[in-house]
Amino acid sequence: MDLVYDVLVIGGGPAGRALARACAHAGLDTAIVDRHPHRGYTATYGAWADELPAGTPIKTESTTVRAYAREEHLIPRTYVVLDNARLHELPPQVQVLNAPTEARYTFNATGARKGRAEQTAVGTVVESDSTETTLMDWRNGDTFLYTVPLGDNRILVEETCLARRPGMPLSELRRRLHARLEPSGREERVRFPLDAPRAKGLAFGASAGFIHPATGYSVATSLALAPKVAQAIQAGEHPKHVIWSKRARAVHALRQFGLEALLRMDADETRDFFELFFQLPAELQRAYLSDREDVTGTAAAMAKLFRAAPWRLRAKMMNTW
Ligand SMILES: Cc1cc2nc3c(=O)[nH]c(=O)nc-3n(C[C@H](O)[C@H](O)[C@H](O)COP(=O)(O)OP(=O)(O)OC[C@H]3O[C@@H](n4cnc5c(N)ncnc54)[C@H](O)[C@@H]3O)c2cc1C
């Protein structure tokens, strides 16, 4: 007879493994279905340090973070690149299976469904001893350059199309990146949806719709929510209210509104938009980028940016242009 687990997680990405780890640490009988348990993560996962739970494995840390729109902006937050090898580790209590079995709670953590709006990027790793992150450099058109230190005198430089429906082809991003710099051997390719519907039933990570529609980030959310979900199960509560609270749904709707506005903007308007965004007070920038439950802060950031915007950009934001 099959063993019955407290928790079964299907999918061994950063979200699924974080959840399995947290559930095992909470003393729950936990299994994970991972079809390739020895295949590590190849993506470079970045996040704001203040979004992450204590003990998150970090590879590099930038205390100087810049963004360029019309002007240069210093962002007063620490940005990190996660340590993939440690992010992939599981404690020995977690059973790794290659097919689903019975469990009290089964979580779908199989990654994002298909969507129509996508973020795409092509990156290359080059030698540099810089420890600074450039979150966005919009000075060169409708795609931006993202630069993060990887340690060992290497940095990742990525030509990124933040949001397009459908996504900008990787061939075009590669052409733009190579026009800026000589590529190295290792190429990072990024393509994922920003508006994918949530998987039905109990889900976690990108399949649960954790991807921020207007930025593309989800890993920090998964890492931060995993222990909360585990605690809820341990306390005998259904975890669905932790995963999607009413406030999180409201914030998600506001962020989706932000995505639709971005999709309507041309290169000049996008640059103006981010010039205004990076002029917002740091706490409002943080609310919009990171606070999944902060309805007031998210709405306040959007309202302040709208009030500061010229009439043409306002019209684009409201879809009246
Ligand atoms: C190259 C790249 C870079 C990114 N960079 C960042 C970043 O810097 N910061 C950030 O926050 N986000 C980033 N993202 C976006 C997003 O956060 C990532 O896609 C992230 O990997 C999502 O994590 P996840 O665990 O939810 O899903 P996934 O990483 O997609 O993992 C899902 C796992 O489930 C497995 N699976 C699928 N179907 C089944 C099945 N039927 N049975 C069993 N297993 C199955 C898959 O093989 C995969 O291992 C990036 C995305 C890409 C593609």
Image (cartoon, grey):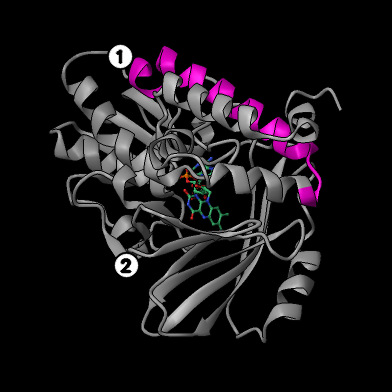
7 sits left or right of 132 in the view: left
Q: Is residue 39 visible?
A: no
- Range of magenta residues: 240-268
Mark 2: is the Cβ under 8 angstroms from ligand 1? no
| Residue 16, horizontal then vertical, whole percent | 38, 42
Q: Considering the numbered disc 1 on the image, is that residue within a helix, a strand or a loop? A: loop
**What is the quadrant of the C terminus in the image?**
top right
Q: Is residue 168 visible?
A: yes
Image quarter of residue 132: bottom left
| Residue 284, horizontal then vertical, whole percent | 44, 34
Residue situated in front as seen by the camera: 152 or 62: 62
Residue situated in front as seen by the camera: 278 or 286: 278
**What is the quadrant of the N terminus in the image?**
top left
For disc 2, the neighbor class at 10 Å (few under 14, some 14 to 19, many from 20) is some
Image quarter of residue 164: top right
| Residue 283, horizontal then vertical, whole percent | 38, 37
113 up-or-down from 250: above or below: below
- At 23% from the left and 21% from the top, the residue drawn is 233
- At 57% from the left and 72% from the top, the residue drawn is 157
64 up-or-down from 261: above or below: below
Which of label 1 and label 2 is nearer to you?
Answer: 2
Q: Considering the numbered disc 2 on the image, is that residue within a helix, a strand or a loop? A: strand
Q: Say which residue label 1 marks.
A: 238
Residue situated in front as seen by the camera: 42 or 296: 296
Q: Indicate the amino acid at tag 1.
A: His
Q: Tell me, for residue 59, which label it has, or none.
A: 2
State which tag comes first along the sequence, 1 or 2: 2
Q: Indicate the amino acid at tag 2.
A: Lys
The CA distance from mark 1 to mark 2 is 34 Å
Residue situated in front as seen by the camera: 92 or 206: 206
Q: Is residue 72 magenta?
A: no
- At 24% from the left and 13% from the top, the residue drawn is 237
